Amino acid sequence: MALLRPSVLAAEASASSEVPAPVARAVDASLRRAIAARASDLHVEPATDGAGRTRLRIDGLLRPGEPLGRDLFAPFVSRIKLLAGLDISNRRLPQDGRYSVVVDGRRVDARVSSIPTIDGEKLVIRLLDHHVTLPQLDALGMDTDAIASYRRVAHAPWGFVVVSGPTGSGKTTTLYASIAELDRSSRNVCTVEDPIENRMAETSQLQVNVRAGLTFPVALRSFVRQDPDVIMIGEMRDSETAAVGVSAALAGQTVFATVHSNDAPRTIDRLIELGVERHSLAAALTAVVAQRLVRKLCTACRESEPVPAHLRSTFSPAIAKWFVASACHVCDGTGYSGRTGVFEVLEVDDAIRESIASGVSSATLAHIAAERGHRSLYADAAAKIVAGTTSFTEIERVVGWWVR
Ligand SMILES: [Zn+2]
């Protein structure tokens, strides 16, 4: 680690003496409120005339936090930058750092990123609470058939299990819940992650450190040499990582990985785009999961309403009523409380394997899967609307109902 230059030390010293106690208390209170509200991120951003504001991401959506007056905004930003080990005198280049806070005896990691916008510095603080109890596979929102199918592949002695979806769709939680079910005392379980979101017992977890040269492929290649049984790849975004994952699965290991894509059939295309050889992929792949996180309707205030005539026949069987969001004190006026997953679990059997190897389009693959009784992401979304778990509006917002 490089020694701090004297100028940086001087800047920090003067800044810490410049940060008055009320500012330190305001920062502390703001983080505590965010953690108490289950926020995943706290945004601190410039408003007009040198003032600022905070916003909290809760259940996937930003909500307004407290305004920061002209006197408070700049020292507020400096205080957080100082805590995260950033150079507070540098306001012209993006920086990132981290620190931890202890709230009610729990340590919460705060990963801070600062960006110089035209209006001033904007900070986003990602909050990682390592003590949140990991959900069980049964609690994620998969229906009974999907869970049974998923467990068959997750517990198999080898194979390549890929979970796909956009950022914030709960992919990593699904992988954690999968690994939590495995017998880890008799198996060598390794993870490569960025960031490590939760700590798991009897698991070798590795944090990627790109600056130090510890990238996903470098970390994976090292783990492969350490006699692994199960490998979790936090995110596959380059061809080398994908190639190591596929070859580890073909060598008899169970590999869990996440990738960005829209639905299960299109995940195959995404992996081919990443440079994975089609026949190796067909041979290695045992399941593709696509998922989204949607907000659950608040059961204290949700209201039953007639389904608009033009949408009734979309559901099979057709439905006349569904639930919509309202507002009450239980859900803080949002109409929603908590989230659940919408899932598509495509178990790769011989027919699907042949289709992948022969290079059929994702549309054809979706058609073949449907013929085999496979439930698509949209079918699972529809089932959750019918059950009153979530609303059509929420599904439209997150899944994009008509975009197939
Ligand atoms: Zn409510």
Image: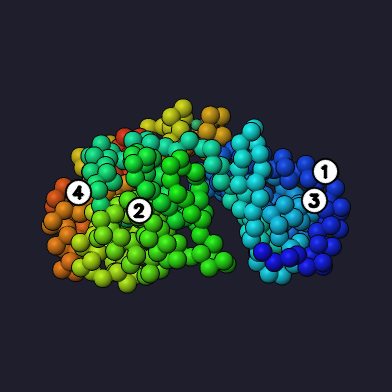
Residue position for label 3: 72
Residue sitting at 20 percent across and 54 percent down? 348
Q: Secondary structure at mark 4?
A: loop
Mark 1 CB lies closer than 8 A to ligand 1: no
Q: Is residue 327 found left or right of 251 in the rendered image?
A: right
When the figure is inspected, residue 278 is found, relative to residue 50, above or below; the finding is: below
Residue sitting at 41 percent across and 51 percent down? 190
Disc on res. 389: none
Counting other residues with Cα less than 10 Å from the Cα at mark 1, is it few (<14), some (14-19), or many (20 or more)?
few
Residue 306 percent location from the top left of the image: 33, 37
Question: Which tag is nearer the camera, tag 1 or tag 3?
Answer: 1
Q: Quadrant of the N terminus?
A: bottom right
Q: CA distance from mark 1 to mark 3?
A: 9 Å
Q: Between residue 390 and residue 291, name the one nearer to us.
A: 291
Residue position for label 2: 228
Q: Is residue 97 found left or right of 154 in the rendered image?
A: right
Disc on res. 374: 4
Disc on res. 22: 1
Q: Quadrant of residue 136?
A: top left
